[in-house]
Amino acid sequence: MCEFVVYLLEKDGSRREVTRNIVVAKKREGKTLLMDVIGSVTTVENATVQEVNTLTQELILVHD
């Protein structure tokens, strides 16, 4: 199974790690919900998926 490390791209171009071992990402009511392999959910407000890369197992979010 492919599990992602999720980063949030900051306005200055730097990346901040948000969470790890993510297997599901959903957009719901203006929030991005990230679920890990054990079912725990991390919520990121005002962010959209910019890139998903299975080779590096990274999911990049940007602020809306």
Image (spheres, rainbow, N blue to C red):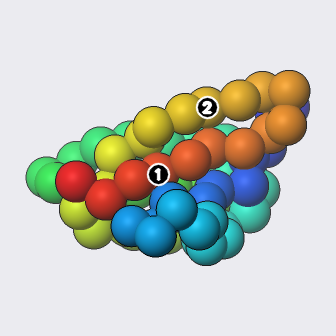
- Is 58 on the left-hand or right-hand side of 51? right
Q: Amino acid at mark 1?
A: Leu
Residue 31 appears anywhere in the view:
no
In the rendered image of this protein, does residue 49 appear above or below residue 32? above
| Image location (x, y in percent) of residue 17 | 66, 70
Q: Residue at x 47, y 51 (%)?
A: 61
Is residue 4 positioned above or below 63 on the image? above
Q: Is residue 10 above or below residue 36?
A: below
Residue 64 to residue 12: above or below: above
Q: Position of residue 31 (x, y in %)?
A: 25, 58
Query: Left or right: 38 with respect to 24?
Result: right
Question: Could you say whether the residue bearing mark 2 is in a helix, strand or loop?
Answer: strand
Q: Nearer the viewer, residue 63 or 18?
A: 63
- Residue 56: image x %, image y %? 85, 37
Does label 1 or label 2 sit earlier along the sequence?
Answer: 2
Residue under label 1: 61
Question: Which circle marks residue 52 in the picture?
Answer: 2
Residue flagged by tag 2: what amino acid is it? Answer: Val
The answer to whether residue 20 of the structure is visible from this angle is yes
Q: Residue at x 43, y 41 (%)?
A: 49
Mark pair 1, 2: CA separation: 9 Å
User: Could you tell whether 31 is left or right of 41 in the image?
Assistant: left
* CB under 8 Å between discs 1 and 2: no
For residue 20, the mark is none
The extreme front residue here reads 12
User: Quadrant location of residue 26?
Assistant: top left
Residue sitting at x 56%, y 47%:
60
Q: For residue 53, what is the image quadrant?
A: top right
